[in-house]
Amino acid sequence: MKAYKYKIFTDKIEEGILNGTLKAGDKLPSVRTIKAGYRLSISSVQSGYDYLVFKGLVTSMPRLGYIVAERGFVNLETGRLPSIVRDAVFKDNVLMTSKRIMHLEQVSLNVAMPDDVFVPQKLVLKTMQEVIREKGASLLRYYPNNGSEELISLIVKRSALHGTMMQPDEVIITDGALQALYIALASVTSVGDIIAIESPCVFSVLEVIANLHLRTIEIPVSLSNGLDLDYLDNVCKDNKIKAIVLTPNFHNPTGILLSEEKKEQLYKIAVHYNTPIIENDIYGDLYFEGSRPNNIKSYDTEGLVLTYSSFSKTLAPGLRLGWLAAGQFFAKAERLKFSLGRSVSPINQEVMIKILSSSNYDKHLRVFRDKLARQASMLINYIQTYLPNVIILEIPHGGYSIWCELNKNIDSSTFYKHCEEAGVYFTSGETFTFTHMYDSCFRVIFSQQVTQADLEVLKKLGQALK
């Protein structure tokens, strides 16, 4: 632990108070006296006294300077409060999926969010300033529980452009996609229910499932055909499945896009067994070629599909603004949303209203998609050229993810040891399942800016693996 310079005088004052040499009300040496006596800077002495004030040992009096406080000594380091225990597995998984490595010689390919350089900072911050000027104190009040009607209307209109018809009365604005998923799952399940999830499945979804105390059956994601619908059909036939949870458009972590034929077939299975579908569409706008893919909800005539998304992956993660179209489950979803927090940040809602009301969002998406496609191509080329023993299982056509597998002739622990030594961070396959099916796999994220220096580090890793 770092030893602060001011400790040379604060330790003596602390000791004097503890042994009774210094008593409540005693005047302490001035800042300038301490500075001269201990050859410290004024800022160091001031920091030392601030530390003593914080600990409750000393108080500052106008025109008198610092005196010993009346209150007794409070030991902040060794108090009687119980230690706080964290779940070690959860902590490690959060770090593997969300911690950015800031050292210049390390490469973070594990964080599924847009790099700062890909966030349209000027657009978002300028819009935020405009909203504050225009809306003023109204931003400090509660907004409608389900969200701004204007924002909901804009989301419904955008969805209609790619064939997904939603009713404004079924849409709820949420604090990001994860809250939307929580509400959707809690609306259609109870503790102990069985749900079907895709396998592999993103860590954050698994955590929501675990916290709701649900049981799961993992449906394999075929790299050639997407979700194994025959397997799903048999599972639904043999079990009372309360929900099917999946990401049909540019699945995380495999990057797979489910075909329109498969989406329609999946919907028919759900209708046959009267099983709700919860679809995550956070990557739908991030297609590299052609037109935006449809949602499963575009086939929904029964209100059986709950679709959710957010603007965290496409615009700025800090906005924490998502939405849920809850279909026939809206009434329960509405009550759940209220219990989790009455109103989503008004300023964030108004910022999105302004951005979606203009052409700025679509302009940003065009630029962002192009950058993502280039980065994906660059990383794929380097992996194929310089990383022996690594197989790319799927070439992505959108989203953030490249799904890779190690050759059988290399041990995964050896591989990650070399990664750590080279300074390269991927997300290991074990975080995407409740089983050990993907221990030899890992995910590469290309939403963080990849520089030539990063590519050289990957090349260095490849040399170590030969």
Image (cartoon, rainbow, N blue to C red):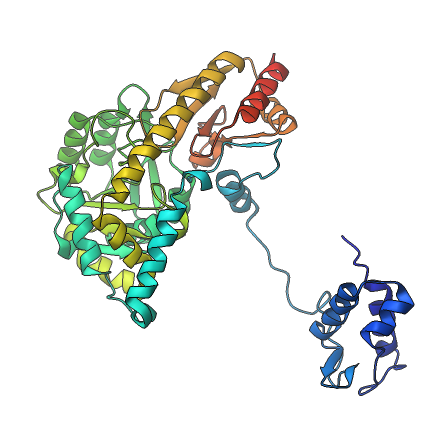
Q: Position of residue 255 (x, y in %)?
A: 35, 28
Q: Return the residue nearer the eye: 334 or 101.
A: 101
Q: Residue at x 88, y 82 (%)?
A: 20
Q: Position of residue 25 (x, y in %)?
A: 80, 88
Q: Residue at x 75, y 81 (%)?
A: 72
5 relative position to 269: left or right: right
Q: Is residue 376 visible?
A: yes
Q: Position of residue 337 (x, y in %)?
A: 28, 61
35 relative position to 388: left or right: right
Occupied quadrant, residue 314: top left
Query: Considering only vertical position in the picture, is 378 above or below 3?
Result: above
Outermost residue on the left side: it is 301
395 relative position to 428: left or right: left
Q: Is residue 320 visible?
A: no
Q: Residue at x 62, y 37 (%)?
A: 103
Q: Return the residue nearer the eye: 134 or 331.
A: 134
Occupied quadrant, residue 142: bottom left
Q: Residue at x 47, y 38 (%)?
A: 111
Q: Quadrant of the C terminus?
A: top right
Query: Considering only vertical position in the picture, is 236 above or below 419?
Result: below
Total marks in image: 0
Q: Position of residue 407 (x, y in %)?
A: 50, 15
Q: Return the residue nearer the eye: 170 or 129.
A: 129
